[in-house]
Image (cartoon, rainbow, N blue to C red):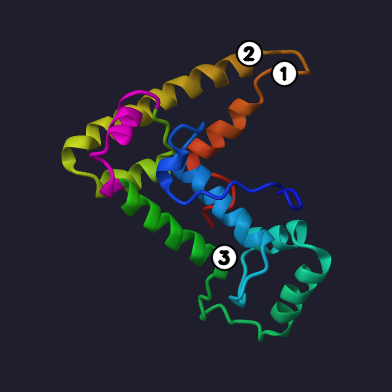
């Protein structure tokens, strides 16, 4: 995470379909970055490791200090409290909203075109979509994941064979990580 990077504010999952990578990961990455960077009216009472470091990295020092003062003053939850990170909860709620939005738009021409032409999905979002979409579309989701798996396998094998210290194609490693577990910080 970079301090105060320019955010792309998406209002719909459909806006991300022509971007590279998994559209859900892209949408949620921007949502999460906006949540970390922007002062919010919602108080933060609990953060996970990733979001604690994210807040420290991207907020202005006074704003970050304000958030951390609140967190330091909170009583330490016991292991039985199962308190969830407030930001993770918001990201997961947004993820559910965007999956439902996508499913409700599946009959639109741009969605059908995306599904047939240049779709990329990470495994977690592909599996969530499979459970929500009509059964007739699940083979297409499987084909999208399988096709991207084959592409990544080829890129990774090529990267593995490159013996020079300045390897070309390091982006394949990040794409493989996203494919397996989604964008960094979207899963605990």
Left or right, 186 with respect to 73, comes to left
State which tag comes first along the sequence, 3 or 1: 3
Q: Is residue 111 magenta?
A: yes
Report how far apart the C-alphas of labels 1 and 2 lie in the structure. Answer: 10 Å
Eye-nearest disc, 3 or 1: 3
* Point 69% across, 47% down: residue: 6
Magenta-colored span = 103-118
Q: Residues within 10 Å of mark 3 (few under 14, many from 20)?
A: many
Q: Which residue lies at the image location 74% right of the left edge and 48% below the top edge?
A: 2
**Among the two numbered marks 2 and 3 on one chain, the one whose residue lies closer to the N terminus:** 3
107 on left or right of 42: left
Q: How many marks can you see? A: 3
Camera-side residue of 153 and 80: 153
Q: Give the mark nearer the N terminus: 1 vs 2.
A: 2
Q: Secondary structure at mark 2?
A: helix
Q: Which mark is residue 167?
A: 1
Residue 174, x across and y down, in percent: 60, 34
Report helix, strand or loop for mark 3: helix
Looking at this view, is 64 or 74 the one in front? 64
Dot 1: what SS?
loop
**Magenta stretch, overall SS:** helix
Residue 159, label in figure = none
According to the picture, the residue beneath numbered tag 2 turns out to be: 161
Closer to us: 105 or 154: 105
Q: CA distance from mark 3 to mark 1?
A: 36 Å
Q: Which residue is mark 3?
A: 87
Rendering quarter of residue 125: top left
Whether residue 182 can be seen here? no
- Disc 2 versus disc 3: distance between alpha carbons? 40 Å
């Amino acid at each position: 995470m970079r301090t105060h990077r320019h955010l792309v504010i998406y209002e719909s999952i459909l806006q991300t379909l022509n971007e590279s990578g998994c559209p859900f990961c892209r949408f949620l990455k921007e949502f999460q970055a906006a949540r970390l960077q922007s002062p919010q009216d919602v108080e933060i009472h609990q953060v996970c490791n990733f979001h604690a470091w994210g807040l420290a990295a991207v907020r202005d020092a006074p704003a970050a200090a304000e958030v951390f003062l609140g967190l330091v003053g909170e009583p330490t939850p016991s292991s039985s409290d199962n308190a969830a990170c407030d930001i993770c909860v918001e990201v997961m709620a947004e993820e559910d909203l965007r999956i439902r939005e996508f499913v409700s738009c599946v009959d639109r021409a741009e969605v059908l075109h995306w599904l047939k032409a240049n779709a990329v999905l990470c495994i977690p979002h592909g599996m969530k979509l499979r459970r929500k979409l009509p059964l007739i579309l699940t083979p297409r989701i499987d084909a999208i994941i399988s096709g991207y798996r084959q592409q990544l396998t080829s890129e990774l094998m090529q990267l593995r064979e490159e013996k020079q210290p300045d390897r070309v194609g390091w982006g394949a490693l990040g794409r493989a990580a996203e494919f397996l577990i989604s964008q960094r910080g979207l899963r605990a």
